[in-house]
Image (spheres, rainbow, N blue to C red):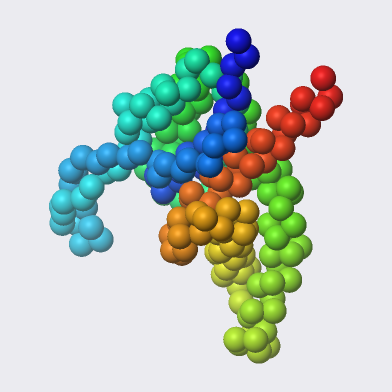
Amino acid sequence: MPKNIVIVGIDCGLKGAIAIISGQNPPQIFDMPISWKPIKRKNKAGKMIPRKKFYYDLPAIMTVFRKYVKDKVYIFIEKQGVRPREGAISAMTIGQGYGTLIGLAYGLGFDVTIVAPQIWKKMYDGLNTKTLKESLEKKMKDIDGAKEYSKEKISRLLKAEGKTRAREIASLLYPELADRFADVKQDGPAEALLICQYGCQQHELVQNRN
């Protein structure tokens, strides 16, 4: 009996998400399962203050994955790298989670593809760098006229523009899930779904070549 084909898209990060498309079923989207523990850190004045350290909830992630161990699962995970101005602790947490997700997927016998963001985004016209720059430049001109911004500021605005556009594209693809991407902080679920859609396209291309 042929195994059911399952495509999974993962936007790594503590605010990321896991999107799953199985057969003709509607997509399922899970916020990245996370947990936390209390710690203490020094503030700028040198005083120790209570904080929360967030980390991936591995048992919860396993619960999501385990349902598909009898299926043929193709997982597409966005490649991670050190981001500008990112703290060492944050980078280490994301790096550990990224590696663990890949290890869990391989351990369960899933087919894993690591895809760079600039690669999967090529599938969507609204996410290519040229389109985003043109959209951002128009908004900046409409709001601030000839005001100039630093390269760092433009980079941050460009990133935010990309996240907004990802939510818009995901809402257009699946209007019934639009509420899932309505909030400005819901770019993780949107990008996970778009990565999942990219994975579906890649699987179809592979099938067509065989």
Please name whichever residue, 155 or 197, is drawn nearer the observer in this view of the structure: 197
Q: In which quarter of the view is residue 119 placed?
A: top right
**Residue for point 67% across, 36% down:** 200
Most extreme residue toward the right is 209
- Please, is residue 112 above or below residue 169 in the view? above
160 sits to left or right of 94 = right
- In which quadrant of the rendered image does the N terminus lie? top right
Q: In which quarter of the view is residue 134 placed?
A: bottom right
Most extreme residue toward the bottom is 145
- In which quadrant of the rendered image does the C terminus lie? top right
Find residue 59 and report its horizontal and vertical position in percent. Answer: 31, 26
Please name whichever residue, 67 or 109, is drawn nearer the observer in this view of the structure: 67
Find residue 162 and report its horizontal and vertical position in percent. Answer: 61, 60
Q: Count the marks.
A: 0
Q: Is residue 13 visible?
A: no
Find residue 88 and report its horizontal and vertical position in percent. Answer: 41, 44
10 sits to left or right of 136 = left
Find residue 181 and report its horizontal and vertical position in percent. Answer: 48, 58
**Residue for point 54% across, 37% down:** 25
- Please, is residue 102 above or below residue 178 in the view? above
Please name whichever residue, 9 or 100, is drawn nearer the observer in this view of the structure: 9
**Residue for point 32% across, 40% down:** 34
Q: In which quarter of the view is residue 175 placed?
A: bottom right
77 sits to left or right of 58 = right
Q: Is residue 105 visible?
A: yes
Please name whichever residue, 96 or 208, is drawn nearer the observer in this view of the structure: 208
Most extreme residue toward the top is 1
- Please, is residue 146 above or below residue 102 in the view? below
**Residue for point 65% across, 86% down:** 142
